[in-house]
Image (tube, helix red, strand yellow):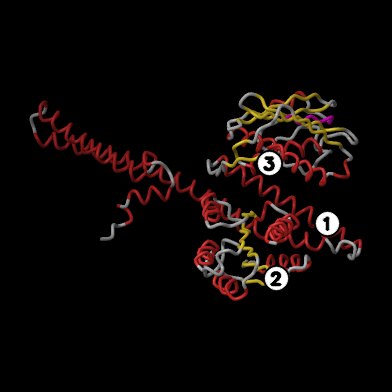
């Protein structure tokens, strides 16, 4: 026998992806049960103190009606909220799949044109293709940032648990970023202390944290300066520190540095295209991984950002 | 010459990948949907398959299941190349023995080609 959709409470709850006690159809059922109990109780109470049974019936009916209206209103509002939330998640999914796909097609096509045809291409054309590539890269980065934020804020972050070497990940990321900022003439020195063990966590998100911090260090460093990275084991944590000799963060901006879309007042001329999302994302991820993140900085001297995350 | 089968419904991506891999000296064949992919895999016996997960007619995981059922195709190395990154699909694909799972938006073309090359190296 087919159950009508409205009566299939478990099915409806599954659709919203929330626990039972937050699921509107289930709550409505509980409220209904509660209203029945209240009516019986009121009837018993009323019939003791009020003589006219019609008056008792009237009171019981009125109270039940009021309760019914209130519970309908509450569960309906709740349901609307859940629907909006569901729409938001669906929107994110659509963005992630339908906007990301054409962007990677575009980028890969440009990669292909630029990679080995470089010498054969006319100089002008090569430069134009590079402009296209740079801009599609910016769209992709922003899209990835927004996706990560909505995933984490919407509690939809799928954290993988895999064992991997943070040291190897950091070395790989340094190589990639050094390549990207080759023209800046900045040296990176990596110091590793006391046998850093492998950690159990999510590679992709940790790479995001480290590469956000390192890219900042590169963008805001003075030319020909050095970035010092320290990696060490600290009790049950792995501690990583990135120290740059850069422009630093003005004192009055420091309290807001991890806020979404915030950009310090002195960075605009160094990296005008920044979105103010990098540090916000780094903090979100580190906190979700049960770690800590922080910094010390002096304007004109440099900044040191550090994070530590549990090994297990 | 090693033979690579690309099962990918995005024609532009298919072409880019094909050209880039041909430049590396591989023989490349392409399918634009799951059914065609299975047919080509069985007839052409490629050394490596690049598989998208969201495909018309039969999706990537169905293709993978079907390839694993057939004794001739069950040992072909498969790299999943997709923008679909839910944990469940990653786990399912790994369970079905894919050698790598790459999310397109996280890699440049060059990185993907390098990964494909290193998988093919392993086959020798």
Instruction: Tell me whether marks 3 and 1 sit on the same chain.
Output: yes
Q: Earlier in the sequence, mark 3 or mark 1?
A: 1
Pick the front one: B81 or A77: B81
Magenta stretch encompasses residue A245:
yes
Q: Quadrant for the N terminus of chain B, please.
A: bottom right
* Chain of the residue under label 2: B
Residue drawn at x 86%, y 36% is: A187
Q: Is residue A123 left or right of residue A234?
A: right
Residue extent of the magenta highlight: A241-246
Q: Secondary structure at mark 2?
A: strand
Residue at the spot of label 1: A130
Q: Secondary structure at mark 1?
A: helix
Outermost residue to the front: B124
Q: Is A275 above or below relative to B80?
A: above
Magenta stretch encompasses residue B123:
no
| Of the two numbered discs 1 and 2 in the rendering, the one whose residue sits closer to the viewer | 2
Instruction: Tell me whether marks 1 and 2 sit on the same chain.
Output: no
Residue at the spot of label 2: B28
Q: Is residue A272 left or right of residue B36?
A: right
Pick the front one: B40 or A38: B40
Q: Quadrant of residue B76?
A: bottom right
Q: Position of residue A92 (x, y in %)?
A: 57, 50
Cβ atoms under marks 3 and 1 closer than 8 Å: no
């Amino acid at each position: 026998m087919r159950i009508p959709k409205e009566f299939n409470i478990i099915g409806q709850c599954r659709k919203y992806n929330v626990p039972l006690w937050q699921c509107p159809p289930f709550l409505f059922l509980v409220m209904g049960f509660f209203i029945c109990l209240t009516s019986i109780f009121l009837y018993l109470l009323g019939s003791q103190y009020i003589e006219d049974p019609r008056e008792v019936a009237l009171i019981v009916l009125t109270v039940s009606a009021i309760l019914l209206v209130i519970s309908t209103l509450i569960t309906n509002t709740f349901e609307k909220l859940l629907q909006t939330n569901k729409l938001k998640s669906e929107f994110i999914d659509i963005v992630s799949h339908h906007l990301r796909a054409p962007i990677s097609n575009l980028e890969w096509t440009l990669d292909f044109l630029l990679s080995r045809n470089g010498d054969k291409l006319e100089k002008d054309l090569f430069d134009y293709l590079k402009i296209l590539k740079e801009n599609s890269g910016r769209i992709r980065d922003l899209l990835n940032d927004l996706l990560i934020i909505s995933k984490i804020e919407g509690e939809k972050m799928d954290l993988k648990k895999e064992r991997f070497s943070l040291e190897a990940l950091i070395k790989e990321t340094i190589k990639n970023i050094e390549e990207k900022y080759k023209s800046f003439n900045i040296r990176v020195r990596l110091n590793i202390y006391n046998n850093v063990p492998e950690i159990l966590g999510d590679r992709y998100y940790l790479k995001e944290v480290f590469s956000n911090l390192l890219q900042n260090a590169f963008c805001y460093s003075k030319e020909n300066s050095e970035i010092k990275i320290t990696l060490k084991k600290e009790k049950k944590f792995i501690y990583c520190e990135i120290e740059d000799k850069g422009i630093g963060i003005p004192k009055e901006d420091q309290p807001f540095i991890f806020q979404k879309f915030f950009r310090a007042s002195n960075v605009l001329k160094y990296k005008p295209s920044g979105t103010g999302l990098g540090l916000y994302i780094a903090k979100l991820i580190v906190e979700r991984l049960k770690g800590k993140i922080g910094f010390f900085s002096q304007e004109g001297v440099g900044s040191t950002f550090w994070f530590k995350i549990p090994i297990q | 010459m090693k033979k690579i089968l690309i099962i990918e419904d995005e024609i532009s991506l298919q072409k880019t990948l094909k050209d880039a891999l041909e430049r590396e000296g591989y023989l490349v064949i392409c399918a634009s949907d799951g059914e065609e992919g299975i047919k080509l895999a069985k007839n052409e016996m490629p050394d490596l398959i690049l598989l998208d997960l969201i495909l018309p007619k039969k999706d990537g995981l169905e293709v993978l299941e079907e390839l694993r059922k057939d004794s001739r195709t069950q040992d072909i190395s498969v790299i999943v190349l997709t923008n679909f990154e839910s944990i469940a699909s990653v786990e399912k694909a790994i369970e079905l023995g894919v050698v790598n799972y790459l999310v397109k938006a996280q890699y440049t073309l060059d990185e993907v080609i390098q990964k494909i090359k290193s998988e093919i190296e392993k086959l020798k």
